[in-house]
Amino acid sequence: MKSFALVPILSAVLFAPLAEGQDMPLSQVLIEGEDWRVVSEGHGFTDGLCADAEGNVYFSDVKSGTAIYKVDAAGQVGEFVKDAAGISGLKWGPDGRIYACVARGRIVVAFDKDGKMTELAKEVQPNDLVVTHDGNLYFTMTGAKEIRRIDPEGKMTVVNAGTVTKPNGITLSPDQGTLAVSDHGGKHVWAFRIEADGTLAHPEGYMTMRTPVADPEIAKGDGMTTDAYGRWYVTTAMGLQMFDPTGRMGGVIAKPQDANLVSCCFGGPNLEYLYAACGDKVYRRKTKSHGILSFQPPRKAEAMPK
């Protein structure tokens, strides 16, 4: 009995920065009358959504694309980095480079503003990644059941193995003290405390995703993002699921179309638009919230306006 009694106490201590938000329904995020609108279409399989400090949004086409694509403030879509095929995850870093998981090439790379590529890791199985404000890169290895870290000096280490059945999407809390990883082969989003040395500790199945009736144990958790209020968003088979900072379900935003919903991010003016990669298209919708950028200095989650 004692071991069970300690579980909620430990959770409150280990993830105290997450426990400030309460009662955050979808009505605090969605704007009445606003719906998903197509940003880009005609692709094979969109993925890898991320934004820069100006709100420009970047994405990939894993299936048939040959570049990293950019959506500017005016909504114009163009190629940002040419000759960049097979990318499944993208994030900007504090050094002004865009980092990528090249699933097809089994490498993790970074591109500078001129498109020059630097290889950071090879012979890996990268799926998605996030880069902290101090240059630590964490990426998921779905097939190997691993989470790996590449430190600012370029050293790669396995920081978790076997905890998550199929680690997929990955994101950070606003204070960058917690790393969250979705499980494509289960029904939980896992939270880890990031230690001072960059290692991960105290894994917990912090969020329970809703699952299809036909497969109640597998939510197909995929890409993730976080907003300035500490809410977590995860793409799943059921739609875009939102959780408050305590890990409590706030609601499910319907998919923009009946296709695989695999990636999401906040971008656009003031990072107020929620973007989604769904099948052959990229969509967006304006929200009452706004996003955060992991390459910028960490901060406490904002309080909801009254």
Image (cartoon, helix red, strand yellow):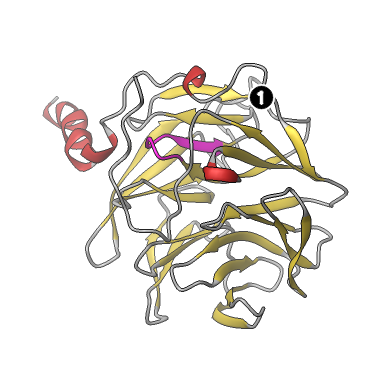
Q: Main secondary structure of the magenta part?
A: loop
- In which quadrant will I find the N terminus? top left
**Would residue 112 be counted in the magenta stretch?**
no
In the depicted view, which residue is nearer to us: 65 or 203?
65
The image shows residue 212 at horizontal and vertical percentages of 63, 24
- What residue type is disc 1 on? Ala
Q: Is residue 159 left or right of residue 196?
A: right
The image shows residue 131 at horizontal and vertical percentages of 45, 63
**Would residue 233 be counted in the magenta stretch?**
yes
Write the residue at 61% across / 35% down.
236
> Can residue 296 be seen here?
yes
- In which quadrant will I find the C terminus? top left
For the image shown, how many numbered marks are present on the structure?
1
Q: Which residue is mark 1?
A: 254
Q: Is residue 57 left or right of residue 159?
A: right
Classify 158 as above or below 49.
Answer: below
Magenta-colored span: 227-234
